[in-house]
């Protein structure tokens, strides 16, 4: 059985459902974006939202993906950096209790957290304080971390640290590990476009992007963007929301419809899509089945609040998952 290693920002998500979007304007947060904030900004947001109901959950894009992969039955590990505080303990315990190998480095800084504002239409906007997560350095990444893994999945939010990403991918490639990259956010793509394009052309095997990220990366609409990305790497996936997803591997392309769902919160939809897809690859399923697994999970995650399914929700989905997997 193939094993999957993830690396990303180790964050705790603070989920807040908004009655209206006025707060986004107050905090100067473009709806649907991921904005990095400093410690004073984080304290200001915390003060303004102190009376609002909140849900705490471990988060970070790659972490969410790895959680989903493990729930589907594939062995997995996660590399990240956390503080020696309550949020850090929460993150470590959640990783370990989920059966994921915790490859976590300790920091004296605060554990990072992301306040996710969920609008009435299900769109989410992140104000992220990276804290300890931002202190993950190339020196933390050693060859031993990659032992025994077959696929290495990275979240695009890390590409702002070029040296870290470059070293991690080099070590993965030295061990013949397939590299998967989720582009993460359109503004991250815009800010790191040249570096990302070079990375994808030369080092990355699989790219996941949503419609906005694909446009930022290629300047093209979904179908043309898919073709452009697939010319740079082995497998390209462009997710187009309620219209499903587009996949291309070599000369073979696929269009998969989304499954019916009630849109409540889009947090984690792209992350769980990658879970299903990469789990399928690890099990040597067809590209179409990989896409169907990703599409089914992402269609269902938007009907719950937060980036992960509860154990009960996984149980309710298990029969449909097995049915998709039976197609091989």
Image (tube, helix red, strand yellow):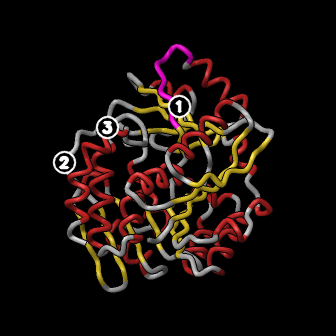
Sort mark 2 into few (<14), some (14-19) or many (20+) by Cα contacts within 10 Å.
few
- When the figure is inspected, residue 259 is found, relative to residue 326, above or below; the finding is above
Instruction: Kindly identify which numbered label has been placed on residue 260.
Output: 2
Q: Which residues are magenta?
A: 50-57
Is residue 54 shown in magenta?
yes
Q: Residue at x 44, y 75 (%)?
A: 229
Q: Is residue 29 left or right of residue 304?
A: right
Q: Residue at x 25, y 72 (%)?
A: 328
Q: Disc count in the image?
A: 3
| Helix, strand or loop for the magenta stretch, by majority | loop
Closer to the N terminus: mark 2 or mark 3? 2
Q: Nearer the viewer, residue 298 or 99?
A: 99
The mark lying in front, picked from 3 and 1, is 3
Q: Residue at x 59, y 69 (%)?
A: 196
- Residue 120: image x %, image y %? 34, 30
- Label 3: which residue? 312
- Looking at the image, the residue that sits furthest to the top is 51
Mark pair 2, 3: CA separation: 20 Å
Mark pair 2, 1: CA separation: 27 Å
The mark lying in front, picked from 2 and 3, is 3
Q: Nearer the viewer, residue 116 or 321?
A: 321
- Residue 286: image x %, image y %? 29, 75
Closer to the N terminus: mark 2 or mark 1? 1
Sort mark 1 into few (<14), some (14-19) or many (20+) by Cα contacts within 10 Å.
many
- Label 1: which residue? 14
Mark pair 3, 1: CA separation: 22 Å
Q: Quadrant of residue 78?
A: bottom right
Secondary structure of the residue carrying numbered label 1: strand
Instruction: Kindly identify which numbered label has been placed on residue 124.
Output: none
- Residue 193: image x %, image y %? 59, 66
Q: Residue at x 27, y 71 (%)?
A: 288
């Amino acid at each position: 059985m193939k094993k999957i290693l993830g690396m990303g920002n180790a964050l705790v998500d603070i989920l807040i459902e908004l009655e209206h979007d006025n707060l986004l304007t107050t905090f100067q947060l473009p709806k649907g974006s991921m904005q990095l904030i400093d410690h004073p900004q984080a304290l200001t947001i915390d003060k303004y939202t102190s009376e609002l109901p909140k849900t705490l959950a471990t988060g970070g894009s790659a972490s969410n993906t790895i959680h989903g992969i493990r729930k589907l039955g594939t062995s997995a590990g996660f590399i990240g950096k956390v503080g020696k505080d309550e949020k850090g303990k929460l993150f470590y315990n959640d990783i370990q209790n989920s059966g994921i190998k915790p490859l976590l480095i300790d920091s004296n800084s605060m554990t990072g957290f992301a306040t996710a504002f969920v609008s009435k239409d299900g769109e989410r906007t992140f104000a992220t304080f990276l804290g300890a997560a931002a202190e993950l350095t190339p020196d933390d990444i050693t060859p031993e971390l990659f032992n025994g893994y077959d696929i290495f999945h990275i979240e695009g939010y890390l590409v702002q640290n070029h040296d870290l990403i470059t070293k991690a991918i080099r070590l993965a490639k030295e061990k013949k590990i397939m590299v998967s990259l989720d582009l993460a956010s359109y503004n991250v793509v815009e800010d790191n476009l040249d570096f990302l394009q070079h990375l994808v052309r030369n080092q990355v095997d699989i790219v996941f992007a949503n419609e906005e990220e694909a446009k930022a990366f290629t300047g093209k609409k979904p179908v043309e963007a898919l073709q452009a990305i697939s010319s740079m790497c082995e497998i390209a996936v462009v997710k187009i929301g309620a219209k499903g997803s587009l996949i291309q591997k070599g000369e073979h392309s696929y269009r998969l419809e989304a499954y019916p769902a009630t849109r409540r919160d889009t947090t984690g939809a792209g992350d769980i899509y990658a879970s299903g897809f990469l789990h399928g690859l690890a099990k040597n399923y067809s590209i179409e089945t990989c896409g169907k697994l990703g599409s089914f999970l992402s269609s269902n995650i938007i009907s719950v609040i937060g980036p992960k399914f509860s154990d009960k929700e996984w149980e309710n989905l298990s029969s449909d998952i097995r049915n998709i997997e039976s197609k091989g």
